[in-house]
Image (tube, rainbow, N blue to C red):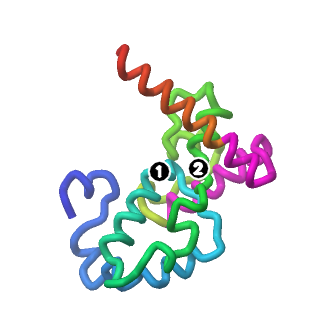
Amino acid sequence: VPEESRAVHGITDEELAGAPDFATVMPRVLELLQGKLPVAYNAPFDRGFLLAEIQRAAPEGMTPGDMPPAARDEVVWVDPLVWAREILKELQSRRLGDVAKHLSIPLEQAHRAAGDAEATGRVLLALAAQMPRVYGELIRLQKRYAAFQDAEFAAWKRFR
């Protein structure tokens, strides 16, 4: 594990010794995505990482049609970060740990899959009262907010 990565998540080479590689667990991951609507905090990062790993580990002859819609561009993942940026504008930082703390949600083992997943789900539930209940409307607004937030960030970077 590279030192920079270990500094973020704390995972060591010893912890990974004997763990299966992604190609081994990929069939189970694809099975879990089947018929599901994924939720990820900063979804473009996790989704991009997952899709790159799927592409790298895919067996010869596997096509996008062999994957569930959530592993293709057909399903937009729900991203609580986009909603936190829109709903919790008063927060200086919208990192998962900061949003969880603001909402009094415990975050055990930040930057570890189980801890981040649980905190992300709890953040989503805490923000849900202020989010559309219908998937189509939720995703339409999420895309709009994300595009605006991306443009705002790009402008900030240009003029800082």
User: Which of the two labelled residues, at mark 2 and mark 1, occupies the earlier sequence position?
Assistant: 1
Residue occupying image coordinates x 49% and y 80%:
66
38 vs 4, left or right, is right
Q: Residues within 10 Å of mark 2 (few under 14, many from 20)?
A: many
In this rendering, the answer to whether 103 lies above or below 113 is above
Q: In the drawing, does residue 151 fall left or right of residue 7? A: right
Q: Which mark is residue 44?
A: 1
Question: Disc 1 marks which amino acid?
Answer: Pro
Please give the name of the residue rendered at 58% of the width and 49% of the height, measured from the top-left corner.
79
Task: State whether the magenta stretch is mostly helix, strand or loop.
Answer: helix
- Callouts 2 and 1 close, C-beta under 8 Å: yes
Q: Which mark is residue 79?
A: 2
Measure the C-alpha gap from mark 2 to mark 1.
8 Å
- Residue flagged by tag 2: what amino acid is it? Asp
The answer to whether 59 appears left or right of 118 in the picture is left
Tell me which segment is drawn in magenta. Answer: 114-141
- Mark number displayed over residue 56: none
